[in-house]
């Protein structure tokens, strides 16, 4: 997938994607809080915190790391950008769909695609 959408810095600041989202669990059952905010006229996502299956804070290499970048709006509530998939150690194109307090994220590496639904914290 290749995406080429344009957005202004002003539009990026008003995006409904902006805010903090809780991820779905990874293979270890850990979740993260990812903050989306304007960066360089687009939107980026940075991991703020991570938690184990019992809700206890954990330290991972991704905490503090920008894992989503170059995100632009393609249609109302629909975005495209790049994301780092730590399980694979790869960067892939991502599609992001905001539906109220839910964020559906989809990324593909070749013909293999995976999706996850996140929830808005604020």
Image (tube, helix red, strand yellow):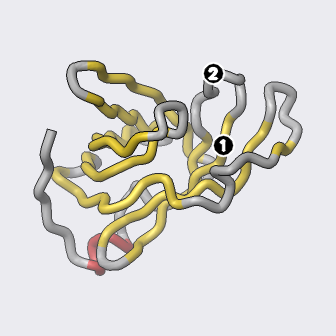
Furthest-front residue in this view = 89
Q: Is residue 40 above or below residue 25?
A: below
Residue 23: x %, y % from top left: 58, 37
Q: Is residue 44 above or below residue 61?
A: below
* Image-quadrant location for residue 7: bottom left
Residue nearer the viewer, 15 or 4: 4
Q: Above or below — where is 71 with respect to 110?
A: below
Instruction: Check disc 1 and report the residue beneath it.
Output: 32
Residue at the spot x=28%, y=41% of the render? 95
Which of the marked residues, 1 or 2, is nearer the chain's N terminus?
2
* Residue mark closest to the camera, 1 vs 2: 2
Q: Secondary structure at mark 1?
A: strand
Total residue callouts: 2
26 relative to 74 in the view: left or right:
right
Q: Specify whether 66 is left or right of 109.
A: right
Residue identified by numbered label 2: 27
């Amino acid at each position: 997938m290749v995406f080429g959408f344009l957005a202004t810095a002003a539009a990026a600041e008003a995006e409904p994607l902006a805010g903090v989202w809780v991820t779905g669990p990874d293979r270890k059952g850990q979740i993260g809080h990812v903050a989306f905010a304007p960066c360089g006229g687009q939107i980026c996502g940075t991991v703020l915190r991570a938690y184990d299956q019992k809700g206890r804070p954990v330290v991972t290499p991704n905490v503090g790391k920008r894992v989503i970048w170059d995100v632009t709006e393609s249609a109302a509530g629909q975005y495209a950008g790049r994301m780092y998939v730590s399980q694979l150690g790869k960067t892939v194109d991502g599609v992001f769909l905001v539906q109220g307090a839910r964020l559906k994220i989809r990324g593909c590496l070749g013909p293999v695609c995976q999706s996850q639904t996140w929830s808005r914290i604020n």
